[in-house]
Amino acid sequence: MRAEESILLGITILILAGVAVLWMAMVNRRRIREMEHRERLAMIDRGLVPPPEVDPIRFEQYSGLTRTESPAAVRARSAGVILMGFGLAMVLLLAFAADSPEVGFGIGGAFALLGAAFFVNGALLSRSAPPPLPDWRSRPSSKTNGPIEPPPSSLP
């Protein structure tokens, strides 16, 4: 067997092994999710409401423990980073390629400062009040961990 064939065989074996590991991980994850689902159904059948820790992200959002950022703040910060990068690129391009450092720092610096202003604006917008969560009274009420009243039975 030549060296090229052995390298090709080794790469093929590595690829197949990687696919096998990914397949086993997906099967394992599916089984875990199925068990979690069955556990949740069993709790509901017994008249219990699953605790909020089952979905901790939603629980933290409704309880006010996390703050979601407004899209405007994210856009402003992104624009600021892009403009700062563009400004620094202009500084380097005009200072070295055009052999004019004064013009490079003037034009590129202006773009970098504009980007910094956008970045600061995004940071200040993220500190403002978060968007209001839906009113808790509009959601159906339920006890968090207590028994649920069984539905009325049609049998005597």
Image (cartoon, helix red, strand yellow):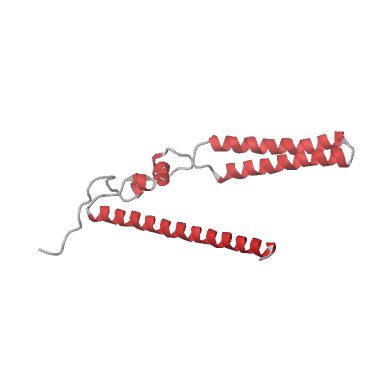
| Residue 148 visible from this viewpoint | yes
Nearer the observer, 77 or 134: 77
* Quarter of the figure that contains the C terminus: bottom left
Q: Quadrant of residue 66?
A: top left
Identity of the residue drawn at 61% across and 64% down: 9
| Residue farthest along the left direction in this orientation | 156
Residue projecting furthest to the front:
1
| Residue 3: quarter of image | bottom right
Q: How many labels, in total? A: 0
> Residue 84 at x, y = what percent?
71, 39
User: Where residue 50 appears, x then y in whole percent?
Assistant: 30, 49
Describe residue 19's horizontal placement relative to residue 82 as left or right.
Answer: left
- Whole-percent x and y of residue 102? 86, 33
Locate residue 134 relative to residue 40 in the image: left or right.
right
Location of residue 127 with respect to 38 vertically, above or below: above
Q: Name the residue located 15 percent from the left edge and 64 percent from the top edge.
A: 154
Q: Note whether residue 134 is visible.
A: no
Q: Residue 115: x percent and y percent?
A: 70, 39
Q: Nearer the viewer, residue 125 or 11?
A: 11
Task: Report the quarter where the N terminus lies.
Answer: bottom right
Q: Residue at x 63, y 41 (%)?
A: 77
As drawn, 22 above or below 111: below
Q: Is residue 48 above or below residue 154?
A: above
